[in-house]
Amino acid sequence: MHEVSVEEMMAARDQRFLRQKKLQQKGRTLICFTLNIAGPIKTSPLIKKAFQEGALLLQNQLKAAGISCLYSEIHDRNSGPEGYFCCNGNPADIKQLMIALEDQNELTRLFDLDVLSPQGDKLSRQEFNLPPRRCLLCENEAAVCARSRRHSIEALSGRSQQIMTRYFQQKRKHLLCQNAILALLTEAAIAPKPGLVDRLNAGAHQDMDLFTFLQSSAALIAPFEQYVEIGSRFAFNQPQALMQALRTAGRQAEARLFQATEGINTHKGANFSFALFLAALGALLQKQQPLCWKAVRQWIQTLLLQEDSFFRPDSYGRRIEKQYQIGGILHEARAGYPSVFETGLPTLKRLRAQGWTLENAALNTLLQLIVTTEDSTLLHHAAPDQIFALQNEIRNFLSLRPNQCELLTFVQQLDQKMSQNHWSPGGSADLLALTLFCYFIERKQHKLI
Ligand SMILES: [Zn+2]
């Protein structure tokens, strides 16, 4: 990485001054955006990313205030990235907006947003009776610390690195959790799901409805964030350490779930699977590895290698597992979720590419999942031979490659039949939620890099 000399910094400042003069000739208010990064290294991939984020926040801030940016230019220099924005608006209003942006969060405290009036006057915080900016290390007045050289360059530059890294980690965490919750809510709402709770009816269930699912989805927000954090925190440790932390957090989340639903099991299986997915994604991103499902699957498999069961020995999943010699969700997880990656996601993507609505594509995907997986929740009420017949019926229907209309007619009938028989394919519903999550993430993955 390039280390800038004092001479280079001086030259860059002169150049900036000239550029400002030139742009002022346009008779507009000018915003000059630079980053305040201590030390001789003024540009790096992380610094550039922070700058891009800043430019975006700045433009959004202007847009929200109804101020149009008429011209902008951005330069990537060794002395640090810099941006110029010529705006149509009152300089005092714009300065206040920029001050608010500088004070918005930890990252924006690294922003230097100078505002120059059309006459070339630089506006200052003092004009608005606002306190001066604070030092990032000791919270005293920043200018005083800078003049007295109170902190070492290493300490200051380390702090800015830490601020930028944390900001993007937080942002990724929110994006992952937001999409995980979105997947749960979408799965719950999609209708008519055969035998399952949806926005139209409660399917085979008497003790829960859509609102129970909304309650438990909301209860999972904090645990989901914790799973990503655990993944990041233990990314460089032994998988056992990560799994240990995940197990503890997972059990606490289960308790929260049952509290939220007053003892009804809505998302226990989803909680188990999302814990693994989110921790694996957290670990991958922490290691700055490219996001690919193959790597996520490997992470999950590694995590479960020495794991007996997330479920307690007396849990329903374990009893069914023993009784019918099937692994249920644990078997899926140990194999790296083949149903999600080899059946669910390809089906959903194919149908979406053919123009199917998300809801219909998801319903079709659910049918595919019911026929290809061993659903231990379904086994709760249906005998193995009944399931076999049901799977055959669905398989035959799917082999006719139905269109969206035909699919809806079929699932409506299937919903009635399965609801009457108290057959609820809850395991497949969890796999659909995971499929939707992967689908959402794939579409937003550029934001995760
Ligand atoms: Zn200080």
Image: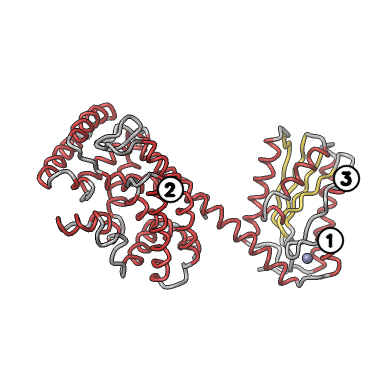
Q: Residue 311's spot in the image, x, y percent? A: 30, 59
Whether residue 373 sits left or right of residue 255 in the image: it is left
Lower sequence index among marks 2 and 3: 3
Above or below 170: residue 215: above
Lower sequence index among marks 2 and 1: 1
Give the label on residue 203, or none: none
Give the label on residue 127, or none: 3
SS under mark 3: helix
Residue at position x 29%, y 32% in the image: 192
| Farthest left residue in view | 385
Q: Amino acid at mark 1?
A: Ala
Q: Residue 134 or 88: which is nearer the viewer?
A: 134
Q: Amino acid at mark 3?
A: Glu
Q: Quadrant of ligand 1?
A: bottom right
Q: Residues within 10 Å of mark 2 (few under 14, many from 20)?
A: many
Whether residue 61 sits left or right of residue 311 in the image: it is right
Q: Disc 1 vs disc 3: Cβ atoms closer than 8 Å?
A: no
Above or below 378: residue 406: above
Q: Does any atom of ligand 1 lie closer than 8 Å to the CB of label 1? A: no
Q: Which residue is mark 1?
A: 143
Q: Which residue is mark 2?
A: 180
SS under mark 1: helix
Looking at the rendering, which quadrant does residue 152 occupy? Answer: bottom right
SS under mark 2: helix
Residue at position x 20%, y 51% in the image: 374
Q: Amino acid at mark 2?
A: Ala
